[in-house]
Amino acid sequence: MERILTGDRPTGPLHLGHYAGSLRNRVKLQSEYDTFIIVADVQALTTHWETPGLIGVNVREVALDNIACGLNPEKASIFVQSMVPQIAELTIFFGLFTTADILFCRADVVPVGEDQLPHVEVTRFIAGRFNELYGEVFPEPRAMVSDVSRLIGLDGNAKMSKSLGNAIYLNDHPADIGKKIMSAVTDPARIHKTDPGHPEICTIFAYHKAFNAGEVPEIEDCCRKGAIGCVGCKKNLIVKLEVILAPVRERRAEYDKPGLIDDILIMGTEKAVKAGVETMALVREAMHTNYWKER
Ligand code: SF4
């Protein structure tokens, strides 16, 4: 049997226009199709945001009108949009184009790279709009831009990324990291150790800035004067990276045991769900969609 989805926005009582235009037809269709009738309370809020309390009343009225016209609840599933979490879940995936996942736990601050700023702006807009319509529920999250928001790739490409094949991975073997660093792009003007360099265009220098900040002034000076060679400069970086990555590798091995990471994820997810439940309780309260609170 094919499936049909149709329904009404519970913004007021249904009238003859509804009957002639759709209800009459629904009654016929319910025997031919697996029928879902959506009482689209969330949609109703987009135009009736000033009177959210009335929507709850109309949800029942609209359901009654449908049944009164001949819809058989045994055949047709009449349901309330906001009470089906999978619709919200699906919206998350569709929402990849305009993400608002920051808001589920009412985050105040979002550390991001510069390229993520537009997402935070959209989120702030959504939070602000919600608060304006239904009262203060969400903080308008502030972006905290990281100093090294984007690391250039080993090949000098503006971005280190898996797809470009120009990345050093946290779980790379030290020997592979060494090989990668030794073959990374530097200043092409430096053929001999004594050639004056231009650290500002050098990948290795960018990595020193990100991971070996203390030595940056000295490296910059020596590079410009042609007082250090690129091989030595790279070897120095390898040592510094190893200081950072060796404990990372160790900790990874410690936690890379059957089931352990799942347990950690389950624990974190439980806390996130708790935060989400709290947020949704506030949202439903503010939007007057907590219809079955008393039951
Ligand atoms: Fe880059 Fe270091 Fe060579 Fe200068 S000396 S070009 S900073 S690798």
Image (cartoon, rainbow, N blue to C red):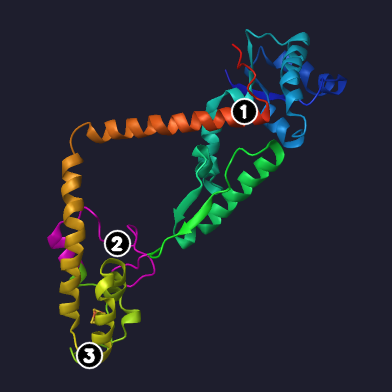
Q: Earlier in the sequence, mark 2 or mark 1?
A: 2
Residue that lies at the very extreme toward the right in this rendered image: 16
- Report the mark closest to the observer, 2 or 3: 3
> Quadrant of residue 229 in the image?
bottom left
Residue at the (34%, 60%) spot, across then down = 161
**Left of 206 or right of it: where is 9?**
right
Location of ligand 1 given as a quarter of the image: bottom left
Q: Which residues are magenta?
A: 151-180
Residue 165 has which mark? 2
**Left of 149 or right of it: where is 129?**
right
Answer whether residue 179 is visible to the viewer in this image: no
Q: Position of residue 191 (x, y in %)?
A: 21, 88
Q: Residues within 10 Å of mark 1 (few under 14, many from 20)?
A: some
The one nearer the camera, 126 or 173, is 126
Q: CA distance from mark 2 to mark 1?
A: 46 Å
Answer whether residue 83 is visible to the viewer in this image: yes
Secondary structure mostly taken by the magenta-highlighted segment of the chain: loop
Q: Position of residue 155 (x, y in %)?
A: 30, 71
Residue at the (32%, 85%) spot, across then down = 198
Secondary structure under the numbered disc 1 in the rendered image: helix
Give the residue at mark 3: 226
> Quadrant of residue 228 in the image?
bottom left
Residue 252, above or below 31: below
Give the residue at mark 1: 284
Q: Earlier in the sequence, mark 2 or mark 3?
A: 2
**Left of 284 or right of it: where is 115?**
left
Q: CA distance from mark 3 to mark 1?
A: 66 Å
Secondary structure under the numbered disc 2 in the rendered image: loop
Residue 112, above or below 286: below
